[in-house]
Amino acid sequence: MNKNISIKKEKTALITGATGGIGYEFSQLFARDKINLVLVARNQEKLKQLSEQLLTDYGIKVYVIAIDLTKPAATQSLHQDIKEKGLTIDFLINNAGIGNYSLFVDADLNDLTNMLALNVIALVQLTRMYLPEMIQQGGGRIVNVASIAAFQPGGPKEAAYFASKSFVLAFNRALAVELKGTSVSSTAFCPGPLKTGFAEQGGLVSTRLYRYLAGDIQKQVAKAYQGMLKGKSTVVAGLINKILAFSGELPPRSIALSVNKFLLNK
Ligand SMILES: NC(=O)c1ccc[n+]([C@@H]2O[C@H](COP(=O)([O-])OP(=O)(O)OC[C@H]3O[C@@H](n4cnc5c(N)ncnc54)[C@H](OP(=O)(O)O)[C@@H]3O)[C@@H](O)[C@H]2O)c1
């Protein structure tokens, strides 16, 4: 079966969290390849601005859907909305995600619940909704945005966030095995620290991790895009990120936990 999806025929990519750092970069790469887009985020105005830029610069078809993916039944509503527009999805980029930077004891319960709803539940639901359609269409590509945090034994001050990204990586690894030899692939993209809106949440940008190790977003997303087209199961871009990911898996786990505690402080 064809593992290398053709990008010649008119195709459509669905990107969640399209208006922010990583999602925005994905939107530019798809548009450059003349792939039509369905862009999802909460802020309608930012979606409109992005769609106008993509239309002007690349002349592709762009649909925007403003929706809060933490809300109950949001993914079902999104799926229905896309169906009613008569669109089929060839690329699904499960990118929207938020962090929660604080000692766990101080974390707001609603914020934690919303984070897990977005980072874990919405991602799994959208994958489950679009995978059968991709198989039926004869091909597709899924990207699940995890993090190099996913390889770590834990992240003090980001306990639930790190665990949510480990979920994404483990989920994707198993899915990639299930999809081996089919025309659909699923790629876990594991970015290192990047100075986006995400990093500004709770002042994460002034932690040692972001001060010392923040990377180049365009290079990282370009690697993810290429990896997705090749059907890779995991993409970790850049030597420093590869070292951080690899060292997170080395025993004893107490060392990585201490290093993470150091890096996640200011
Ligand atoms: N930046 C990093 O250092 C880093 C490192 C590793 C992994 N990641 C992962 O990369 C992904 C993207 O992060 P980013 O750095 O690009 O973040 P970002 O710049 O803050 O962008 C986040 C995007 O998600 C949208 N979004 C947020 N909450 C949403 C919700 N409830 N429903 C729908 N859309 C929502 C935002 O738009 P609205 O606010 O308008 O909804 C925005 O478009 C996340 O999964 C994150 O965990 C980031």
Image (tube, rainbow, N blue to C red):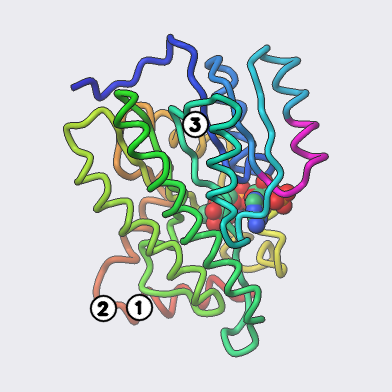
Residue 174 location in percent, x, y? 24, 53
Q: Which residue lies furthest to the right in this view?
A: 45
In this picture, is 56 found above or below 224? above
User: Gap between marks 1 and 3, in whole Å?
Assistant: 32 Å
Name the amino acid type tagged 2.
Answer: Pro
- Sequence-wise first label, 1 or 3: 3
Q: Mark 2 points at which residue?
A: 252
Secondary structure of residue under mark 1: helix
Q: In which quarter of the image is the C terminus?
A: bottom right
In this picture, is 35 found above or below 185? above
Please give the label number shown on residue 222.
3
| Residue at (78, 32) in percent of width and height | 48
Q: Give the range drawn in magenta.
A: 41-50
User: Is residue 52 visible from the viewing direction of this image?
Assistant: yes
| Residue at (42, 44) in percent of width and height | 129
Q: Which residue lies furthest to the bottom in this view?
A: 105
Secondary structure of residue under mark 2: loop
- Sequence-wise first label, 3 or 2: 3
Please give the label number shown on residue 255.
1
The one of 224 and 135 positioned closer to us in this rendering: 135
Q: Which of marks 3 and 2 is in front?
A: 3
Name the amino acid type tagged 3.
Answer: Ala
Magenta-span inclusion, residue 61: no
Magenta-span inclusion, residue 43: yes
Q: In which quarter of the image is the N terminus?
A: top left
